[in-house]
Image (cartoon, helix red, strand yellow):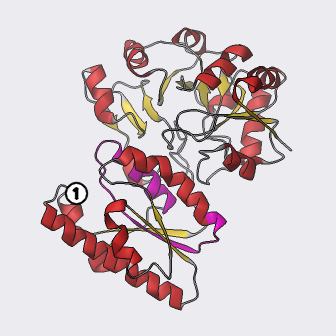
């Protein structure tokens, strides 16, 4: 049984566990991570085993300050320093060439290492007390929604780790942005709260988007350079389907108020009809919507489906905060089918929709073509 310790009183205990080669779940501003000594191959193997994670899926190395990066890399690009100065501590992971001190077990067999400095005072104190870089993927069973509260960690990893350092619910709710600086052009490998536009502005150059993000992941047989690029991720137990309209797709969600109202009605009518059919077939159904459209579902599907609201679509960061919690609630409720609205890919919406598409296994339908 894991020990859940709240606040600073658990820092030294957690650090001692890391030094002994054990595993500690820790809070960040994005999600809870599952930490082990990043320089210890056996600790990394324990992380993969505890999560049921494929060993070619790289782990992110967490440090407490920029000065701790240099021993971990064989090259320190100027672009990396610019990004660290602008966004660290914060939800940005940077991929650089690894130094020999970082074992292949931590990097998933790659000669690169993914490093970030989390914006959480408790965890920064924990890393400093350990005196070691901390390898830390999300603290959940591999493929399931990432944990945004200590209780989520306990649910998934009970009996597999040594301790949970509890700092309450996280702030952002989706994993960090990942940018690869090992090629000729900076490349986004995973969207997060720091957007591709943010990165481009700081670097003064275009940051490319890896095609695998849009395609839903790298192909079988290809070694992923970052977490979340290859394997099934963020998925609830239920089959999840995203619903949008041709109008929104065609205009990239930049529509007039009249068009927006029409699109909302098309999407909600479609979801309500699908809910009705599934309920009649004996399925337990869930719906994910936003505050602006809740009334459309309450009137029709409210007595048939479990309706959960992510937040206001004009504030995508608030919606990312709720997504994984909502997906876990559907698991607790034993939902068998989930229908969710699709939202704009702009800004932080890119991260939100990336996670939603992954959770849905890239299943997205047009309301008018269902």
- For disc 1, the neighbor class at 10 Å (few under 14, some 14 to 19, many from 20) is many
Residue shown at the point (37%, 61%) measured from the top left: 290
Q: In this image, 363 relative to 258: left or right?
A: right
In the image, residue 343 lies in the stretch drawn in magenta: yes
Q: Is residue 91 left or right of residue 71?
A: left
- In the rendered image, residue 72, in percent from the top left (x then y), is placed at 60, 15
Residue at the image position 59 percent from the left and 11 percent from the top: 68
Residue with the mark numbered 1: 253
The correct choice, above or below, for 192 with respect to 73 in the image is below
Q: Quadrant of residue 299?
A: bottom left
What is the quadrant of residue 13 in the picture?
Answer: top right
Q: Is residue 101 visible?
A: no
With respect to residue 209, does 205 lie above or below?
A: above
Q: Which residues are magenta?
A: 331-360
On the image, which quarter does residue 232 sit in?
Answer: bottom right
Given residues 4 and 346, the one toward you in this image is 4
Q: Residue at x 62, y 30 (%)?
A: 107
| Magenta stretch encompasses residue 23 | no
């Amino acid at each position: 049984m894991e020990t859940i310790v709240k606040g600073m009183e658990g820092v030294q205990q957690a650090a001692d566990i890391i030094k002994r080669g054990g595993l500690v779940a820790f809070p960040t501003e994005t999600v809870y991570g599952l930490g082990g000594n990043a320089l210890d191959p056996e600790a990394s193997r324990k992380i993969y085993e505890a999560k049921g994670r494929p060993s070619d899926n790289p782990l992110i190395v967490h440090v407490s300050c920029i000065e701790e990066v240099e021993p971990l890399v064989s090259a320190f690009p100027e672009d990396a320093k610019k990004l660290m100065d602008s966004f660290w501590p914060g939800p940005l992971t940077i991929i650089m060439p690894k130094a020999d001190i970082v074992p292949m077990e931590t990097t998933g067999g790659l000669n690169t290492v993914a490093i970030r400095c989390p914006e959480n005072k408790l965890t920064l104190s924990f890393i400093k007390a350990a005196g070691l870089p901390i390898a830390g993927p999300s603290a959940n069973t591999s493929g399931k929604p990432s944990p945004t509260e200590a209780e989520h960690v306990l649910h998934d990893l009970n009996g597999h780790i040594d301790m949970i350092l509890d700092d309450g619910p996280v702030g952002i709710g989706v994993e960090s942005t990942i940018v690869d600086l090992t090629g000729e052009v900076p490349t986004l490998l995973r969207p997060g709260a720091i957007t591709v536009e943010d990165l481009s502005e700081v670097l003064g150059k275009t940051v490319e988007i890896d095609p695998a993000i849009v395609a839903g992941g790298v192909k079988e047989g290809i070694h992923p350079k970052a977490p979340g690029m290859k394997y099934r991720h963020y998925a609830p137990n239920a089959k999840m389907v995203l619903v949008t309209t041709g109008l929104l797709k065609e205009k990239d969600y930049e529509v007039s108020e009249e068009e927006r109202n029409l699109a909302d009605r098309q999407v909600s009518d479609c979801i309500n009809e699908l809910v009705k059919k599934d309920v009649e077939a004996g399925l337990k159904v869930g719906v994910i919507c936003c505050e602006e459209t809740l009334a459309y579902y309450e009137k029709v599907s409210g007595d048939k489906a479990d309706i959960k609201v992510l937040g206001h679509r004009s504030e995508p960061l608030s919606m990312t905060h709720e997504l994984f919690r909502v997906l876990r609630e559907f698991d607790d409720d034993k939902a068998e089918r989930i229908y969710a609205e699709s939202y704009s890919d702009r800004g932080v919406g890119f991260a939100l929709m990336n996670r939603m598409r992954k959770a849905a296994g890239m299943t997205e339908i047009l309301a008018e073509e269902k």
